[in-house]
Image: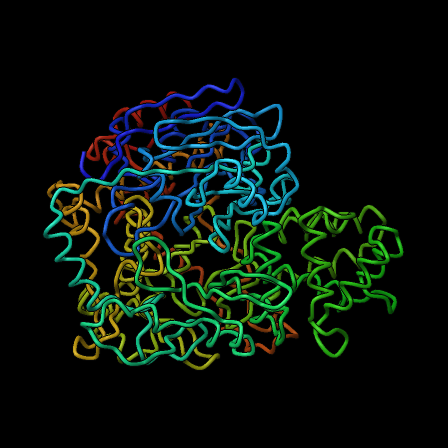
Amino acid sequence: MYGWAGKILRINLDDGSVLKEETSKYLDYTGGIGFGYKVIFDEAPMAGPFDPENRIIFAVGPLTGSLAPSTGRSEVISISPHVYAPKSKHPLVTRSGFGGYWGAELKFAGYDAIVVQGKSDKPVFINVCNGEVSIEDASDLWGKDTYEAQDMIKAKVDDEKTQIAVIGPSGERLVRISPIMHRIGNAAGQGGFGAVMGSKNLKAIAVRGTNGVQVADKKNLIKYVKSVREFQPGPLGSTPLSTGALSWTEKHVDPKDINKQALRFDQTESCAPWLNKYHIKSQSCYSCPQGCYSYMNVDGMGGGAVSCTQWFYSWMGNRDKATFLANQLANKLGVDTFEMFPMIQFVWHLQDQKVGGKSLLRILHGKKLISDDILKGLEKGHYPPEGDLSTVGLETLMNMIAYRQGFLGDALAEGFRRALDIVADKFRAMKMDEAAEKTMRFVDMEGVMGGVVGGNGGWGMSAHYDPRTFGYYWAVNFAVENRDPNRHSMTNLVEWTGLSFEQALPVATTHWGREIAENGLNDLHRERDVPLTWNGHKSAKANAYLGQFIHYRGCIKDSITVCDWVFPIMTSGREDRDYTGDISVEYKLFELVTGEKMTQKTLDDKAARIWVLHRLLTAMEWGGGRETNLREEHDQLPDHFFTPVETRLLPSYPPAEPPHPPLERENFEAVKDEYYKLMDWDIKTGLPRRSLMKRLGMDNELAAFEKQAFTLPA
């Protein structure tokens, strides 16, 4: 099989057994998240996140380990402890992913996926070296941070080239927002899968491989990759026109200068110029020319790699070395940086809200629910002038979460949205209803950076791009997922490119046609009091189409497996191309690597199978096996996206503009109608239709679902 290693590794920590099975068993689901959803669906759809029978799957795709650009991704799939859906009768499945070199190394070792189940009776790490697989004692690693643990494992196996996925102290304590870390900056951030590993007493998975990946057409693959790299843009689809936090810092573009693309992007310069003297180089993942990690070595803090939301303390207003310390603490302890935006806001909210002249934080302290040291540290970390946003407050917050220190640390370790309910319930239990009410007011808090990050986005996670700004396609994206959607398909065109709305429209027209472009896109930079454009049925259809595009391309990216920051290639840095990318690259790379004849329609059908399987798992879990209406119960957004602007809370710091006007529920439901039609899902329930599953060749999955749950619509 071209593109594949051919084997999947299965490890049962209950009895220490190691089995190998053929990858071909799962190829109907392409790779990556497709493999993961299939394993969960077949074997443990109703497991709890911390149950030994829950599976955690690490999977890659056929492009991983090849020469195809930006293919250093690894996907992680499991029942999530992070996802918060109080109306669901069972915890929900979801996904995460990380870059770096681990996935390629797994392929070189001879495997396309690792499936772990069970629970060890003591801390262990899994060691994979080509055909040799062992479960090793990790008692001396337990309690170590992710950097130290990786160094110790490399010493144990006596190989510096070993690639490691590891958890920190937070994962060991089942902190629901604990990521899986790789190297010094790559993280499977959301989903809480570090806690799933911790629940299994699994500290790390180390892989080392010395084989290669065979491709079907090496000569033409090399030729095509070179041509793609001549127009492949900077991270997140940036063009030389961009000026934002994730923009190109080197504006010159020479299409033939393909080996210097990484030099165009220096996040230290764009996100934290006060740290420029500590910047050493831009750093890439396997087979990627982008260089979107900034490698730095800061006095007293060591070396580390920073990218995107790992700059969270800078984006929250810090302007000293604590910006880098925030990254180091999050990566070493294992705390999701994206969660930190609303988390920090919530801690500030507890200090800003007062009852009887005393802050909610001090009330908790007075009830001996917060120690003197934690109170002092958190107040030091308040925004100026009451605090200074420096190292003391940051270290206090990160450590109290990772180590579940005290009542508040334990609550915050559950994730900001669960913590909100926990703290409010504690006030109610103490007969302090006003304090509880003021705590819950935080649900109305807006995010920062114009709603790009922070606030309550749903599923217990920080909001990632505001649907009131982007459009109803993004609202559907939020609603149908089981997590922060984190799909950059559209933001690669309209958010980070530097293109004006007028410049982006021709690009969109090239990709989707005039009808979709003109009725689907919205100007992000319109005045804050201007609502989304809406042109009746045309807008409903256009937004539904873009919603489908996001989900299909997301499933493609996470199954073949390529980087979400790069693919689909919506834009280019080249003016001579009118800044237009090429959204056909994925299927062409797939064909050259695997030898399987491919079209976009064929690849979309593969994506549809994966998305239907995700939907079946969601339906089974949401209803606990009983009949459920996903449209009415699951496919919803937090109410605040529909409420008037004047009901919202604006962050006191950093200063924020008000949100755009609310979504209209009627329009949201109209887009859902059209989305379900495009997907061939039942319009009333949002469930996949039996006829669709038969068309996609999913007869076995249909029979299995209906045996365990209920009959699907015809």
Q: Residue at 56% of width from left, 45% of height from top?
A: 84
x, y (%) of residue 204? 52, 38
In depth, the one of 13 and 495 nearer the eye is 13
x, y (%) of residue 273? 52, 78
Query: What coloring was used for the rendering?
Result: rainbow
In depth, the one of 334 and 483 nearer the eye is 334
Q: Residue at 60% of width from left, 59% of height from top?
A: 340
Q: Residue at 30% of width from left, 75% of height from top?
A: 239
How many labels were placed on the picture?
A: 0
Quadrant location of the N terminus in the rendered image = top left
In depth, the one of 267 and 689 nearer the eye is 267
In depth, the one of 70 and 277 nearer the eye is 277
Would you say 299 lies left or right of 506 here?
A: right
Quadrant in the picture for residue 564:
bottom left
Quadrant in the picture for residue 382:
bottom right
Q: Is residue 460 above or below residue 391?
A: above
Q: Is residue 688 above or below residue 674?
A: above
Quadrant in the picture for residue 251:
bottom left
Q: Is residue 341 above or below residue 67?
A: below
User: Seen from this angle, which residue lies furthest front?
Assistant: 158
Q: Residue at 48% of width from left, 72% of height from top?
A: 268
Would you say 529 lies left or right of 42 here?
A: right
x, y (%) of residue 579? 23, 75
Quadrant location of the C terminus in the rendered image = top left
x, y (%) of residue 365? 85, 56
Q: Is residue 508 above or below residue 549?
A: below
Would you say 650 lies left or right of 290 here?
A: right
